[in-house]
Image: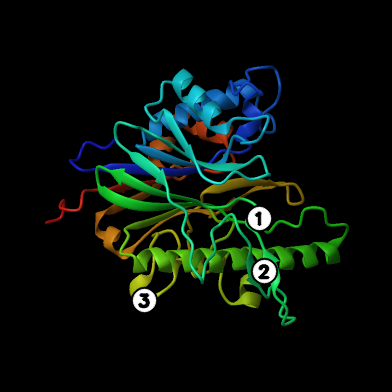
């Protein structure tokens, strides 16, 4: 928690397969099983808790949060975890559940934040748990678009003022299930189309909220970023650039700038590339803010090798590496009158 009057700290973090770390009674599972590759469930739970304590956020958008279904209670799982870990973010708020066992949730400090589920709907942007008709393959026929993980829309009362938050987990472009190189290319292009369509839908909601005069934060895992892959030249823009927009209604995240060739670029995720036998970094996670929040905002990525905080603390560095293949994005906001 920041000490400045009216300060508010929000973080967004994709915790890799968080659901696997809980049993059907919503309790943390410290059995001998494996959570992430090469990391035990007990160790991953400890690492996640340690990182969350270090962030000390007032509210945390969790991507890949525990499942909500007839068998699983994701909100209860998060609250039990928070209590056992000694987190002040001890209450959970979720929106529309999905069928992927990867929910989007807000874990928050009820003494600092009051969230309300506030799904939007307009002619240009249906509610995120509904369907959207869009021509994805340019055959002049409308395709049915669904969010496998509907974005979480919340109105927040915070020490920094009222905010509208949209938590996001956009579609992966990975060609899972491909049988050969040609099939992988086909699936990758189709997934890219779907991911871009989701971002167009999301941008329409952003325009709606800005037209309502909201202070807006859009945070989470976009599975995309400017300059990330070769398909960007085929489709013209990345999904992240679509959501950011341009002009007076543009959103802002300082990391979301297309990198120059050879230039250093920030990253929020680290994956093992088996074919190249090396780790690959990627910028996939963002905390975008509306123009009115830019003067009051400060960003940082808690990366194990790029963050000075982690480099100075080997234990924190190890926790970040063991907890997830993504790293937290932290957004600090000051009060509306802080710069007057």
- In what element is the residue under mark 3? helix
> Residue at horizontal 44%, vertical 66%?
244
Q: Label 3 to label 1, Cα distance in Å?
A: 28 Å
Assess disc 1: are there few (<14), some (14-19) or many (≥20) residues with their C-alpha within 10 Å of its C-alpha: some
Q: Quadrant of the C terminus?
A: bottom left
Q: Earlier in the sequence, mark 3 or mark 1?
A: 1
Residue 310 is situated, as x and y percent measured from the top left of the image, at 43, 36
At horizontal 87% and vertical 60% (from top left) the residue drawn is 180
Q: Nearest the camera: 61 or 114?
A: 114
Callout 2 environment at 10 Å: few (<14), some (14 to 19), or many (20+)? many
Q: List x then y, in percent, for residue 134.
A: 65, 73
Q: Are marks 3 and 1 in contact (CB under 8 Å)?
A: no
Q: Write down the residue under mark 2.
A: 193
Using the rendered image of the protein, determine whether residue 331 is visible from the camera's viewpoint: yes
Q: Is residue 226 visible?
A: no
Distance Cα–Cα, label 1 vs label 2: 11 Å
Q: Secondary structure at mark 2?
A: helix
Earlier along the polypeptide chain: callout 1 or callout 2? 1
Instruction: In the rendered view, tell whether residue 37 sits above or below residue 299.
Output: above
* Lateral position of residue 308 relative to residue 184, left or right: left
- Residue 247: image tag: 3
Please tell me how crowded label 3 is: few (under 14), some (14-19), or many (20+) other residues with Cα within 10 Å. Answer: few
Task: Tell me if residue 326 comes above or below residue 166 in the rendering.
Answer: above
Q: Secondary structure at mark 1?
A: loop
Which residue in the protein does label 1 denote?
172
Q: Which of 293 and 322 lies nearest the eye of the viewer?
A: 293
> Is residue 335 depicted above or below 53 in this figure?
below
User: Which comes before the other along the chain, label 3 or label 2?
Assistant: 2
- Give the CA distance from mark 3 to mark 2: 25 Å
Residue placed farthest to the bottom in the image? 140
Looking at the image, residue 52 sits to the left or right of residue 335; the answer is right
Quarter of the image with the N terminus in it: top left
């Amino acid at each position: 928690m920041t000490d400045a009057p009216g300060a508010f700290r929000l973080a967004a973090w994709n915790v890799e397969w968080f659901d696997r770390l809980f049993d059907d009674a919503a309790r943390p599972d410290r059995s001998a099983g494996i959570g992430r590759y090469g990391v035990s469930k007990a160790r991953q739970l400890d690492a996640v808790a340690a990182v969350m304590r270090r962030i000390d956020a007032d509210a945390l958008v969790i991507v890949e949060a525990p499942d909500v279904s007839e068998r699983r209670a994701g909100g209860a799982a998060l609250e039990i975890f928070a209590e056992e870990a000694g987190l002040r973010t001890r209450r959970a708020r979720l929106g529309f559940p999905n069928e992927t066992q990867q929910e989007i949730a807000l874990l928050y400090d009820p003494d600092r934040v009051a969230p309300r589920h506030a799904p939007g709907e307009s002619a240009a942007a249906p509610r995120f748990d509904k369907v959207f008709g869009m021509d994805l393959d340019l055959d002049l026929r409308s395709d049915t678009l669904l969010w496998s993980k509907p974005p979480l829309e919340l109105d927040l009362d915070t020490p920094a003022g009222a905010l509208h938050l949209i938590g996001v987990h956009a579609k992966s472009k990975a060609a899972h299930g491909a049988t050969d190189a040609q099939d992988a290319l086909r699936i990758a292009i189709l997934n890219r189309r779907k991911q871009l369509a989701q971002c167009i839908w999301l941008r329409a909601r952003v325009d709606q909220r800005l037209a309502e005069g909201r202070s807006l934060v859009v945070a989470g895992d976009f599975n995309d970023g400017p300059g990330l892959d070769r398909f960007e030249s085929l489709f013209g823009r990345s999904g992240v650039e679509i959501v950011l927009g341009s002009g007076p209604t543009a959103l802002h995240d300082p990391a979301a700038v297309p990198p120059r060739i050879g230039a250093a670029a920030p990253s929020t995720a680290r994956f093992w590339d088996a074919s190249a036998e090396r780790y690959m970094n990627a910028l996939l996670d963002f905390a975008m803010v509306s123009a009115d929040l830019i003067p009051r905002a400060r960003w940082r990525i808690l990366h194990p090798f790029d963050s000075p905080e982690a480099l100075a603390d080997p234990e924190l560095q190890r926790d970040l590496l063991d907890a997830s293949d993504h790293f937290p994005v932290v957004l600090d906001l000051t009060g509306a009158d802080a710069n007057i």
